[in-house]
Each structure stands twice: as structure tokens, then as C-alpha cells.
Image (cartoon, helix red, strand yellow):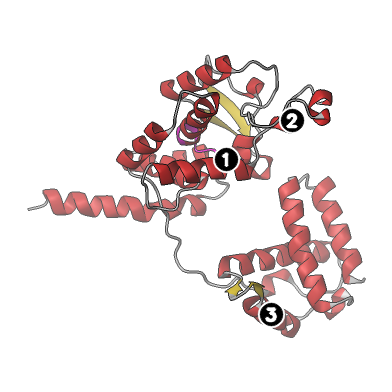
Amino acid sequence: MLLADAIQDFLEHCEIEKNQSKRTLISYQHYLERFLEFTDEINISKINQPLIKKYRLHLNRLEFKPHKNLSIKTQNYHIIALRAFLKFCSKKDWETLAPEKIDLAKIPEREVEFLTREELERLFRTVDNGKITGLRNRAILEMLYSTGLRISELTALDKQHVDLERGEFAIRGKGQKIRIVFLSERTKGWLKEYITARDDNYSPLFLNHRRSRNKQEGDLDLTGEHRRLTDYTIQEIVRTTAIKAGITKHVTPHTIRHTFATELLLNGADIRSVQELLGHSSITTTQIYTHITNKKLKEVHEKFHR
């Protein structure tokens, strides 16, 4: 079978049988199209270890920007997509390379950056709450910290999804997994204040308030989908607020998610519970935070052991 045809079958399988998210499908398509471009149009039976070695060298030397190569982590994403594709081919009994014969590159131990309590409160205080955009931004920051949501999970929220009375709601995360997240009293307060200040009946929980309402697509879209905040906009809100707060760290929505997890562990939460709250499918992913708690234990030992 030709590689292009096999890739198309694989993507359709991921979409229909596996019901994978649109983001996953886009990623798989991007990474596999790069492999297709490298190999040209070949039969999948021609995929072997020497070819994979050449491809990995190609990825390692690829400049996607001037003097900027793909990181080891990004290279591994390409290989993960390729292994998933080869696994599909194996299940179809198509002659090709076995996926288990391809190993991922070893990457340095991941460093997790998080905010201290003082930095976090400074971030919150920096927001100008005198405008509706300020109320929205404060609610976004509080929501990120209270729930540990991923940015894609946050932007997908509609008002009806969030139960402000109970202070908890279900979220569908990676792999279509459903988990429960919880709102602090302070977060509920800011969300209520923001929603009350709005003069619309749009569905999205967080809106772009600077976009003109006179646009034709806005008049046709009664749900307000055209006003939903994007991932990029929320990233910019977090980044610019951190700069105004005088925080020198590179702060992103994921930094706040790291802060959420770190605070839980430092205050005594068990790692299994943190895994559930973060929506990690594997405990291994959650274990990136253990070196932080180990440092804390060392500080305790040095302070109190005589």
C-alpha cells in the first residue's frame, strides 16, 4: 500500500473509530505529512530502520526558523505519531516496520516552573478590575489556579457548563476523559461579578469584548461563538499581566496549572489525587512534580534536624 493512502486510512480511523480530538488529528496529520514529504511516495513495505534513522537525522538537522532547530521533545512528537501510524498498519496486517522497533530519544529531566504564593497574589492584584475586560481577566486567572485547567479546556467552556452554586463541574479533557474540577469561593465570586457585568446572552464563558458587534457574522451568530476567546488571547492575557506584575519568569496558563499542582503537593495532597485533578492518564506524567516536593522535604530536614 502507498504511504499516502495508508496515512489517510489511519487519520480516518483516528477520527471515526477512536473518536480522537480535532487537535490530535491535526497534530498527527502535520507530523505524518512531514514524514511523507521526506520519503516521497513509497510503499509502506519500504519503511525500515535505515529509513527511520535517516528521517531522524533529517528532523534533528531541520531548521524551521533561521538558526532554530526542532527541540528533542518536538522530534519525539513526530516519532510518537509515526509509531501510532505503524501500530495501525500492524493491526491491519500490512507489511511494514513494527512500531516497537522505534525508540524515542532520551530527553533531559523536565523542569517545572511555578509561581510562589507571593508572585501569584501579585499577579492577581495587577489586574485592573475597573473594566469588564479586567473582571474577565481576573476571573480567568482565578479559574486557572482554582481548577488547574488546560488552556484548551478553559477556552471551550460555556456558561452553562459551570455550576457556580455547587462550585464544581465536569470537564472533558485529553482523550475525551471526563473529570471533576472545583472552584474556590474567591473564584466563584469573580466569575459571578464578571457574568453579572455582561450585557449579552452569549454562550461562551469568556468573551472578546473588543470585537465589533456590528460585524455581519456577529449578527448571524446568536450563540456568540465568534466572540469566544482564543488560546492565543488567553496566553497573551497571562503573559502581559505577569510582566506588569514584575514577575521575571516566563508565565503561561500552563505555569499556573503547574502552580496549582505544586501547591496541592506541598500542602500534603497525595500524588494520585493530584493526577485525577489534573486529568493525567498516567501517574508518570504527574511525577514531574515530585522533585519539587523532594526539595521541600530537604528544606524541612535541614531546618529541623539537629
Q: Residue at x 57, y 40 (%)?
A: 234
Q: Secondary structure at mark 3?
A: helix
The magenta segment is 145-151
Q: Residue at x 63, y 41 (%)?
A: 152
Q: Secondary structure at mark 2?
A: helix
The numbered mark, 1 or 3, whose residue comes first in the sequence reads: 3
> Type of residue at label 3?
His
Q: Front-most of 37 and 252?
A: 252
Q: CA distance from mark 2 to mark 1?
A: 16 Å
Local packing at callout 3 (Cα closer than 10 Å; few below 14, some 14-19, many 20+) is some
Q: Secondary structure at mark 1?
A: helix
The numbered dot on residue 234 is 1
Q: Residue at x 50, y 54 (%)?
A: 284
Compared across the picture, whether 306 is left or right of 237 comes to left
Q: Front-most of 13 and 200?
A: 200
Local packing at callout 2 (Cα closer than 10 Å; few below 14, some 14-19, many 20+) is some
Tell whether position 148 is magenta: yes
> Type of residue at label 2?
Glu
The numbered mark, 2 or 1, whose residue comes first in the sequence reads: 2
Q: Position of residue 104 (x, y in %)?
A: 60, 70
Identify the residue position indicated by label 2 in the image. 225
Local packing at callout 1 (Cα closer than 10 Å; few below 14, some 14-19, many 20+) is many
Identify the residue position indicated by label 3 in the image. 58
Compared across the picture, whether 29 is left or right of 107 comes to right
